[in-house]
Image: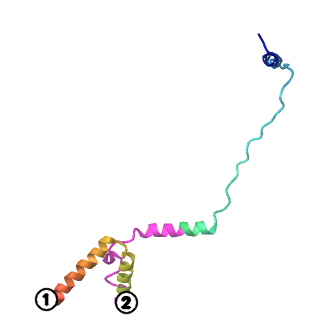
């Protein structure tokens, strides 16, 4: 038995099978996409890039204060500044803090003659 809904569905299927005539053709043209070139880089980007190149050019920062170029030839004032900077850069380093404690112990022994 076929109910009303099934009959309507079957009729819809039969009407949707129409064959288009061969005379019908689509007149559609597709244009090639126009390539776009990016604009010039922003000044901030160029500054960051320049800083990066300069840092890479100079090589990695020496880890030891005495490895810095010109340490021996530097004035007393410059060497003090280098050492101070080195200490400030390493205050969070647990190995450096252990070295400081060991050095303090050694200086006490030397100073007290133990």
> Badge 1: few (under 14), some or many (20 or more) residues near its Cα, within 10 Å?
few
x and y percent of residue 28 in the render? 82, 34
Q: Quadrant of residue 17?
A: top right
Q: Secondary structure at mark 2?
A: helix
Q: Which residue is mark 1?
A: 113
The image quarter containing residue 32 is top right
Which quarter shows the C terminus?
bottom left
Q: What range is drawn magenta here?
A: 50-78
Residue at image x 32%, y 74%?
64
Indicate the secondary structure of the residue bearing disc 1: loop
Q: Is residue 104 above or below residue 48?
A: below
Of 64 and 88, which appears nearest the observer? 88
Mark 2, residue position: 77
Judge whether residue 95 is colored magenta. no
Residue 67 lies in the magenta stretch: yes
Q: Which circle's residue, 2 or 1, is located before the other in the chain?
A: 2
- Nearer the observer: mark 2 or 1; the answer is 1
Instruction: Give the image quarter of residue 49.
Output: bottom right
């Amino acid at each position: 038995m076929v109910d009303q809904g099934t009959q309507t569905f079957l009729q819809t299927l039969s009407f949707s099978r129409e064959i288009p005539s061969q005379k019908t053709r689509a007149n559609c043209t597709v244009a090639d996409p126009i390539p776009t070139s990016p604009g010039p880089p922003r000044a901030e980007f160029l500054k960051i890039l320049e800083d990066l190149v300069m840092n890479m050019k100079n090589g990695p920062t020496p880890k030891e204060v005495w490895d810095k170029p010109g340490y021996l030839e530097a004035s007393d004032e410059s060497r003090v500044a280098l050492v101070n900077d080195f200490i400030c850069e390493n205050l969070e380093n647990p190995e450096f803090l252990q070295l400081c404690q060991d050095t303090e112990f050694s200086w006490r022994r030397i100073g007290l003659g133990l």
